Structure formats: structure tokens, C-alpha cells
Image (tube, helix red, strand yellow):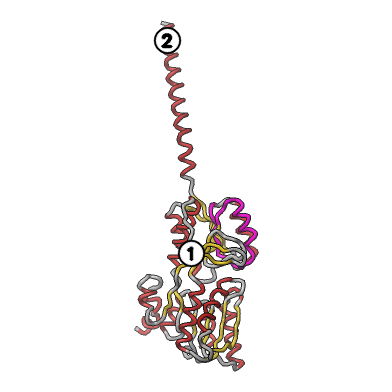
Amino acid sequence: MRKTYFSFSLLLFCLICIFMSGCSGKKTAAEPSIQESKRITIGFSLDSLIVERWIRDRDVFVAAAGALGADVIFQNAANDAYEQVNQVKYLVDSNVDVLVIIPQYADLLSDIVQKARTKGIKVISYDRLIRNANVDLYISVNSIEVGKLMAEAVAEKVPAGNYAFINGPQSDYNVNLMRQGFDSVLRNYPDVTRACDFFAENWSYDKAFEQASFLLDAGIPFDAVICGNDGLAGGVIRALSEHRIAGTIPVVGQDADIAACQHIAEGLQLMTVYKPISELARTAAAVAVQMASGAFVFPEEKINDGTFDVPVYWIPPVAVTRENMDDIIIDSGFHTAEEVYRYKTAVN
């Protein structure tokens, strides 16, 4: 009896050992799967949310990245260039897989970009080019083409006259690219002169309003206004309205902000440039995920960042006027008819 009990105990002990060994083996085999399923983390640094379109960029990007299985750590520098540097350092120290940066100041981030790349973190410069940094990719709507579309619209309306240029800040390299676009068109119009060439810090609506008011109050004549974006155009239109001449002087901008689309519908703004923001954000999210997994195929086209030639992925812009507002803006769902044609619904 004792011998039988001992044999049974020995057999039970052996079975337990085999079972435990099997469990241990399964656990070890499962570890690579856990490692492989690690979610990609993207650091997204934005200069501010003051400009209307950036809210849309952020929301579409985060949603698209999430759908692709990636997490996004979002940082908003609130228009503080040095705060953005600190926030990007934080993202680098957090060991994100990819950095996506909309720079507030084009020349201030090159050192931290180099630190990121040294750590094996891919860097995407989104919408605005980071200068002298040798980022892995620049993805944007083509700002030179944006400038061309704006200048063409004004030149067709006013082929000879005095133009006022209300630009964005010089710290934004896109401003330089847009001006290249302006110049490539306007060199064919020798009778166009410049009433002013103003740069609005932080894309300030108030600065644009003040500059346009100064020109009007000082009696400095201008026949058209090319603005760096729709926010600046809004400031100019306000100044023209206060002088009771809004709609008599062509004003152009970019971004297809809702206020700009309303101004175009009402005849107060000549045109805006629609930048397919949702397409840009979704594409950038997909590229970031592909970069993190090593699957991205880099484009052959490049742009010089001041020191390096970096790969660039362009998305084409579209000119928007009263004539094609429905086709480009409303049919695409960018804004609704009720939003754009507020003056019609107000009358009805």
C-alpha cells in the first residue's frame, strides 16, 4: 500500500512538472508576439492652435493614426518657439518612434532634430519646412503653387496697379516659398508695383488690420491685396469695411477658412486657396506609421532646406472662387452650404 501510494505520488509529481514545463514553454513562445504587437507612438508637435485649420489637421491626423494602430502624443507650443523646442525634446526623450513637427520658427529646431535622428527617431516636417535640419521627409501642400494661384487670381483682375502684400512671419519658410510663387507670376506684369511688403508676426489678424488701416489712413493707394492666409485677409477686409470700401479692392488668401469662404460668397474676398488638409493629415499619418515599420518608400523629388536636399511629398492646392465654391468646398464636405451661405439663410 505504501509502495502504491509512493508510485502514485511520484507519477503525480512528474505530471505536474511536465505541465509546468509546458506552461513555461508557452509563455516563452508568446513573448515575441507581445513584442511584435507593440503599438507605434508618434510625437506630434504643433506651434499653435490659433489658426483655424490646425485644429482640423490635428483631429484628422490623430484619428487616422489611431485607425492604423498608432498612438499620438500631441504637444501645442502656443506660438512660443522656445517652448516648442522644449516640447520636442520631451518627445525625443519619450522615445517616440516618429516625430511630426509643424515648426513655429523654421531655423530653431535643427539641433533637436539631429538628436532625434541620432536616437533612430524618424522626423517628418509637416506643412512647414524645418531649415538646415535634414529631416527624413517634408510633406506639405506646395506653397510655391499656392503663391502662384493667389498672384494669378489678382493679376487677372488687376493686371496693372499698386499691390499691398500682407505676408505671414518671416520665421515661417512657407512665406518665402509663397513669395517665390508670387514673383514667378508677377514678373510677367511690369505695370504692377508694391504699395507695401508687410510681415505679420504670428500670422496676426490684428497686425494685418493695423497695417491695412495705416495705408488707408495715410492715403497710400493700393488696388489689390495679397495676404499670406485667410486670417490676415480677414484683418484687411475689416479695415476696408471700416472705410466703407470692402468688396471694391480684390483681396486673396489661403486655407479656405470658413470666414474666408463666407467673404467670397458675399463678394468681399476674391479667392482663397483650398489646401486638402484632410488628405494631407491622413497621408502624413500613414507615412509616419510606414516609416516606423520601415515600409515607407521615399519620393525622388527633393527640396533644399538651406543646407540639405530632403525628400518632399507635395499635395497640390486648388483655387477657390464664387464660381467653384460648391464643387470644391461644399461637395467635398469641407464646409456646409449653411455655413458658407449664411447671408442667404439669414435673409430667408
Q: Do we see residue 118 in this rendering?
A: yes
**Label number found at residue 313:** 1
Q: Nearer the viewer, residue 112 or 308?
A: 308
Disc 1 on helix, strand or loop? Answer: strand
Residue lying at the far front of the rendered structure: 300
Q: Mark 2 points at which residue?
A: 5
Between the C-alphas of marks 2 and 1, the distance is 77 Å
Is 109 a magenta residue?
yes
From the top left corner, tell me how far across and down residue 31 is, in percent. Answer: 48, 37
Front residue of this view, candidates 7 and 35: 35
Q: Is residue 328 above or below residue 97?
A: below
The N terminus appears in which quarter of the rendering? top left
Please say whether residue 55 is one of the residues in the magenta stretch.
Answer: no
Dot 2 or dot 1, earlier in sequence: 2
Which class describes the residues within 10 Å of circle 2: few (<14), some (14-19), or many (20+)? few
| Name of the residue lying farthest toward the bottom | 219
Circle 2: residue type:
Tyr
State the residue at coordinates (45%, 84%). 270
Placement of 224 over or under 25, stated as above or below: below
Q: Where is residue 73 in the image (x, y as percent from the top left)?
A: 53, 56
Where's the C terminus, which quadrant?
bottom left
Disc 1 crowd, CA 10 A, few/some/many (<14, 14-19, 20+):
many
Q: In which quarter of the image is residue 165?
A: bottom right
Region in magenta? 97-122
Amino acid at dot 1: Tyr
- Badge 2 element: helix
Which of these two is toward me, 11 or 329? Answer: 329
Position in image of residue 147 (x %, y %): 51, 77
